[in-house]
Amino acid sequence: ETLKKAQMEEQRKAELEDKRNRQSDLEEEQEQQEKQKLLQRARRMRLEQDEEIRELNALFLNAKCNMIRDKQVLEKQMIHKELAEEEKRLNKMMEMERDKGMEVQEELERHRKQELMRARQDIVKQMEQNAEERALRAEEVYQEGQRRLERLEQMKREDRKVGAGNRRCREVSTWLERVWQCWISHTQGVGTAREAAWEAEQEQLRLGKEKELARLRAMQEQVQDWQAERDALRAKRNQEVAEREWRRQELEKARKKAELEQQLRQDRLEQVAQKEQYLAMQVEQDRQEFQRVLKAHQEQLEREKLEREQRELRQRAHAEYLRQQIQELQQQKERERAAVLEEGRQQEQEVRQRRQRLTQLRQQKLQEFRSGAASAAFLGSLSPSCSAWATSQLPLHPQQTGPAAEPRSQIHWESNGFFPLQSQWNSCQVLRPCGAQSPELSCHSLLLGPVPRGTSSSPPQIWGSISFVLSYEDKAAGVTNLCVLPSPPS
């Protein structure tokens, strides 16, 4: 058991020793990595202090500053355009509201005129109806009087017919008596004196009766005439009473009609006044609403203007801060370069390695800049002469030699003179060297701006005399080359 414990203790110590060794190895590896990182950083800082890299960084910073400036200019133009459009829209809305108010006013005025015309037509129609009713009532009264007069005349004619019938009856009775007496005389022969006396007496009685009848008839005619006069007088009085009553009713109706017309006019005037007051109140409410909306819009414009000014101030402050950072970075890099240059130059191998690292760094920076955000204003701004010159500077295809190789390539530019903003910051062009079997080259152009030119006899240095750089990719060969084009001849 003691041996077992000792073995376990030895095993535990060995594990601890291995663990410490592993930790030491890890720490050493981490230290080596840190040293490598520091060395790489030092080499990178040393390369950053190189004149060529400084010029490249300056060109990149210049391009980024131009990009920011162009974006700010574009944003300012868009803001001005939006403000102009908003102003036009508000003016259009105000004009539409004014036209709408005018239409409402015209519609109300038209309704008011229609109401007045309708009221006038109703009054005229009512007056015509009243006149027709009065004419009908007058005609009825006249017809009633005529009917009464006709009845009186009819009664008179009937009375005269009755008197004529009585006289006719008396004449017939007399004639019959005479015929009867003649027949008696004829049948009995000559009468006696007594009969003659009786006849004389009868004749006297008859004459007395006739006189009495004549007197009674005259009295009856007088009574009838008096009754007719009384009836005529009564009818005339009744007609006068009816006429007075009709005139009184007509006067009463005329008075009521005048009162009604006066009341209608008063009501109409009150209604018109109420409508005008309502319209005035409505116009005032519309004006107040318009003033409120206009004031709110002006306040909104003021707030937007203030926010825009504050945003511009912040952007300018940020740009100033970026410039200060760039200057501080340049000063720091200059100090670091001064410190690094004190260490001296290394051997030729280090120079070649350094050149290789510089080339790799340039490719890396170009790739970073290509995938970044360069200003679109620098893309596609080459003149036709510069484009033709840049085309002539591209390398020939291996299969094309001799005079037939010219022109060697052709750059297809956008029709609007500049390249659209894309997710990349560079412009991608398709280079097609002349010839049916020519491979396609994907070309990325970057305008770097004027710098001192080199000699035309020797290939120009990339950071000494270039105006722009073309990075083209040979899809067939699967390689990417950097074509450095010198400044075009003036």
Image (cartoon, rainbow, N blue to C red):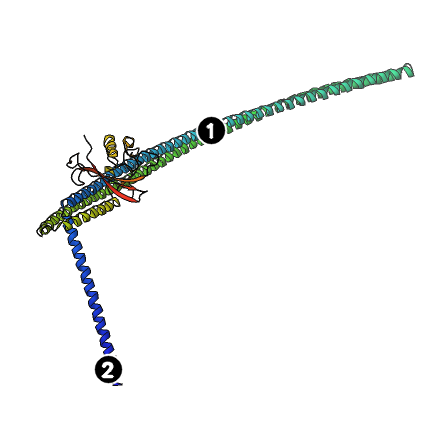
Q: Name the residue that disc number 1 marks.
A: 123
Residue ranking furthest to the left? 342
Whether residue 438 is situated above or below residue 365 in the rendered picture: above
Q: Name the residue that disc number 2 marks.
A: 6
Q: Name the residue nearer the viewer: 346 or 480.
A: 346
| Relative image position of residue 451 (x, y in whole percent) | 16, 37
| Relative image position of residue 384 (x, y in whole percent) | 25, 30
Q: How many marks?
A: 2
Few, some or many residues within 10 Å of mark 2 (<14, 14–19, 20+): few
Quarter holding residue 461: top left
Q: Name the residue nearer the viewer: 413 or 422.
A: 413
Q: Of the residues shown, which amino acid type is indicated by label 1? A: Ile
- Mark 1 or 2: in front is 2
The quarter in which the C terminus is drawn is: top left
In the image, what residue occupies the spot 15% across and 54% down?
A: 42
Q: Earlier in the sequence, mark 1 or mark 2?
A: 2
Q: Spatial distance from mark 1 to mark 2, Cα to Cα?
A: 136 Å
Q: Name the residue nearer the viewer: 334 or 133.
A: 334
In the image, what residue occupies the spot 37% across and 36% down?
A: 274
